[in-house]
Image (spheres, coloured by chain):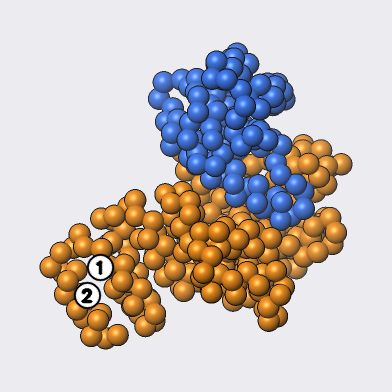
């Protein structure tokens, strides 16, 4: 991770200001530890981050084995919401937890912008 | 060996917190008493959850039982606790080699060799991984990993033999096939990496209170991927190049999931 800690809050602000986003996290892809978070009350950040990191690792390996390269963005869809993730080159996952009717395209853009800030 | 097992069992009974379970579990494993070794390792892990050697022991037993997915997780856990753990590095190298990822296998063995330069087993395995030793074709990930009546699962669907895959919860291929952009068959390797994804996706959305997971769409540098759960214990994978928009991919996945669901119901 290359950005100073103060930049993390700015990166998360980019995401959480999108309507329908319930929270955002920066997660270490290697060990699933939360680096920074802005989550609504009740969301179990550490548990979710550990699982998201594990899914990200399996997905990256599978995608590389399939020859489509590492993931740039992934979107876990569920009945009542979604988890949206952009991995950064520096080994951080930029994660958003969103309502089901969120504008996925907009969240994706802000996740990518946040990923640039985080590095 | 039998005497030593008896002695160690007695010691462990007297002092359940003792670390003799490591030696006992390993001896039982070597003797082929895998169920007993499994029980010893699990009990030991319950008492020593942060001991990397305990995860290493458990992983070796799981690997002997051909439970490669959980063995991977245990060796991965050992490395998280102790990044230089030679046993875990060798174990992961073994699993990577089994799925044909020779590059990762060699990387793990090189890491093991940096930690234990005098370990002849590491040097020998590294030579094989680099193609310097005796020819050693990686074994398939599991004997049961042969596609079952694959043609019927996705019959008539586009990409049935190069971009659609149906797996069970343990990563066993039930149907379809996958080829990389160069035309190489990567079915087994991808299946092995995806083992457990469905359960993790389900646990993630459950923790978030989002109900059931319905799909996972991912953009790659060279292509797109869509995962879907046609049933609670199966996983569908659709892979296409980047020219296929994500929305189109979702539609293909919906059709394939429907076909998979019918096939699974018919073969239940």
| Residue occupying the point 50% across, 39% down | A32
Q: Which residue lies furthest to the bottom in this view?
A: B2
In what quadrant of the picture does the C terminus of chain A appear? top right
- Left or right, B69 with respect to B247, comes to left
Check contact, mark 2 vs mark 1: CB within 8 A.
Answer: yes
Q: For numbered disc 2, what is the local secondary structure?
A: helix
Q: Which quadrant of the figure has residue B125?
A: bottom right
Residue A7 placement (x, y as % from top left):
59, 17
Q: For numbered disc 1, what is the local secondary structure?
A: helix
The residue labelled by disc 2 is B8
Q: Residues within 10 Å of mark 2 (few under 14, many from 20)?
A: many
**Rendered position, B58 above or below A100:** below
Q: Which chain carries label 1?
A: B
Residue B102 badge: none
| Residue occupying the point 50% across, 28% down | A35
| Residue occupying the point 50% across, 20% down | A38
The residue labelled by disc 1 is B20
Residues marked 2 and 1, same chain: yes
Q: Is residue A110 visible?
A: yes
Colour chain B is painted in: orange
How far apart, in angstroms, are the residues tagged by discs 2 and 1? 6 Å
Between A49 and A75, the one lying in front of the other is A49
| Residue occupying the point 34% across, 77% down | B27
Q: Mark 2 lies on which chain?
A: B
Between B245 and B27, the one lying in front of the other is B27
Residue B262 placement (x, y as % from top left):
65, 58
What chain is colored blue? A
Q: Which residue lies furthest to the left in this view?
A: B14
Image mark count = 2
**Rendered position, A82 above or below B47:** above
């Amino acid at each position: 991770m290359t950005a100073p800690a103060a930049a993390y809050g700015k990166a998360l602000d980019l995401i959480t200001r999108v309507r329908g986003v319930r929270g955002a996290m920066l997660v270490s892809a290697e060990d699933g530890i939360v680096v920074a978070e802005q989550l609504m009350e009740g969301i179990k950040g550490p548990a979710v981050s550990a699982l998201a990191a594990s899914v990200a690792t399996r997905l990256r390996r599978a995608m590389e084995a399939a020859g489509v390269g590492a993931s740039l963005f992934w979107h876990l869809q569920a009945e009542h919401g979604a988890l949206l993730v952009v991995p950064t080159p520096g080994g951080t996952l930029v994660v958003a937890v969103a309502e089901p009717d969120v504008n996925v395209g907009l969240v994706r853009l802000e996740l990518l912008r946040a990923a640039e800030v985080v590095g | 060996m039998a005497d030593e097992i008896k002695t160690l069992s007695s010691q462990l009974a007297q002092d359940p917190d003792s670390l003799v379970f490591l030696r006992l579990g390993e001896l039982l494993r070597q003797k082929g008493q895998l169920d007993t070794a499994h029980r010893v390792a699990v009990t030991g892990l319950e008492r020593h959850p942060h001991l990397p050697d305990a995860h290493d022991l458990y992983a070796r037993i799981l690997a002997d039982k051909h439970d490669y997915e959980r063995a991977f997780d245990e060796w991965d856990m050992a490395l998280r606790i102790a990044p230089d753990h030679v046993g875990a590095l060798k174990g992961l190298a073994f699993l990577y080699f089994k799925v044909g990822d020779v590059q990762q296998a060699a990387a793990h063995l090189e890491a093991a060799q940096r930690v234990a330069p005098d370990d002849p087993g590491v040097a020998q395995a590294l030579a094989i991984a680099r193609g310097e030793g005796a020819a050693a074709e990686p074994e398939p990930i599991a004997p049961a990993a042969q596609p079952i009546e694959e043609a019927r699962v996705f019959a008539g669907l586009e990409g049935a033999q190069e971009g659609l895959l149906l797996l069970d919860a343990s990563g066993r291929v039930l149907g379809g096939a996958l080829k990389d952009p160069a035309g190489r068959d990567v079915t087994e390797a991808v299946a092995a990496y995806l083992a457990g994804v469905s359960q993790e996706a389900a646990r993630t959305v459950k923790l978030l209170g989002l109900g059931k997971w319905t799909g996972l769409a991912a953009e790659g540098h060279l292509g797109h991927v869509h995962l879907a759960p046609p049933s609670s214990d199966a996983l569908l994978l659709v892979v296409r190049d980047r020219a296929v928009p994500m929305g189109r991919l979702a539609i293909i996945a919906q059709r394939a999931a429907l076909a998979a669901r019918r096939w699974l119901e018919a073969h239940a």
